[in-house]
Amino acid sequence: MALYDQIKAIYPQLTDNDFLTTIRLQNDSDGKGDYIAKWEHPTLAKPTAEQLA
Amino acid sequence: MSSMVLSGDTSGTVTVTVPAVAGTNTATLPAATGTVMVSGNMPAFSAYQSSAQTSSSSTNLKILFQTKEFDTATCFDTSLSRFTPTVAGYYQISASINMVTSVATWQQCKLYKNGSFFKQSFAPSSSSNIDIAGFSGLVYANGTTDYFEIYGIVGSGQNTGASQSVTWFAASMVRAA
């Protein structure tokens, strides 16, 4: 499951706008896959590695 | 053809050549201090994507440009898809990203400078299954360490369209620093 889908499963209330403003998911095309480059959501905590495992 | 040869401070020469012309022609140098730029030392490149990528939903994907059309100063590295200008100055940067296979809800084309998000464009959804987001902007580069990359993001996971005409990255120097 893609990182985006994992995060949406944890926080279904997140909107497209959240991913354009306070949250930035990124993939540098270096073979390391998707990762959270920025998490500045005002109320929701950044998912832990355990939650995303 | 007449020429004027200037000796370098320590070695070498610069030759200013005037071709055969009719009439009286005047080239005026500006009353300013700086480096004279000519076509040979103003970097310009154009590259495009020749192998498609797959993007996850709402995830900023570094777009790869594997093939160069031209690169006058060897400033674009296809292995990193990175533009690193070798002359300090101001550059016009343009890019286009094509997303295919399904209708995107929205998409953006982003310019990253030195590994960080710098500027972006925004393209709303199209009514077809072909969407293109473009970017154009004027930026400064220090000519040594500054580098630029293109990222794309779409509302729903897509494949990029690998094509010389729709997924490309280009830049040229506008003026020296």
Image: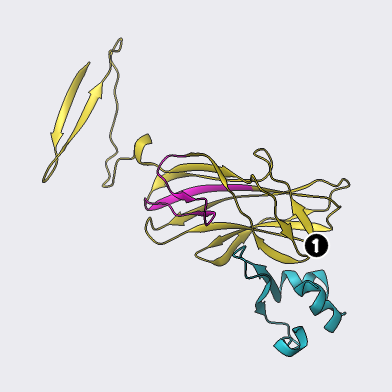
Badge 1 marks a residue whose secondary structure is loop
Q: Colour of chain A?
A: cyan
Residue B91, position as x, y percentages in the image? 47, 49
The quarter of the image holding the N terminus of chain B is top left
Above-or-below relation of B29 to B87: above
Res. A10 image quadrant: bottom right
Q: Which residue is mark 1?
A: B155
For this view, does B12 lie left or right of residue B168? Answer: left
For this view, does B160 lie left or right of residue B164? Answer: right
The front one of A10 and B138 is A10
Res. B4 image quadrant: top left
Residue B81, position as x, y percentages in the image? 54, 54
Q: Residue at the far top: name it.
A: B22
> Does residue B73 belong to the magenta stretch?
yes
Residue type, mark 1 in image: Gly
Asked if residue B51 can be seen in this view, the reply is: yes
Residue at screen point 67% across, 38% down? B165
For this view, does A41 lie left or right of residue A28? Answer: right
| Chain coloured yellow in this rendering | B
Q: Which residues are magenta?
A: B71-95
Residue B12, position as x, y percentages in the image? 15, 39
> Does residue B127 belong to the magenta stretch?
no
Asked if residue A48 can be seen in this view, the reply is: no
Q: What's the chain of the residue with tag 1? A: B
Count how many numbered circles sit on residues in the image: 1
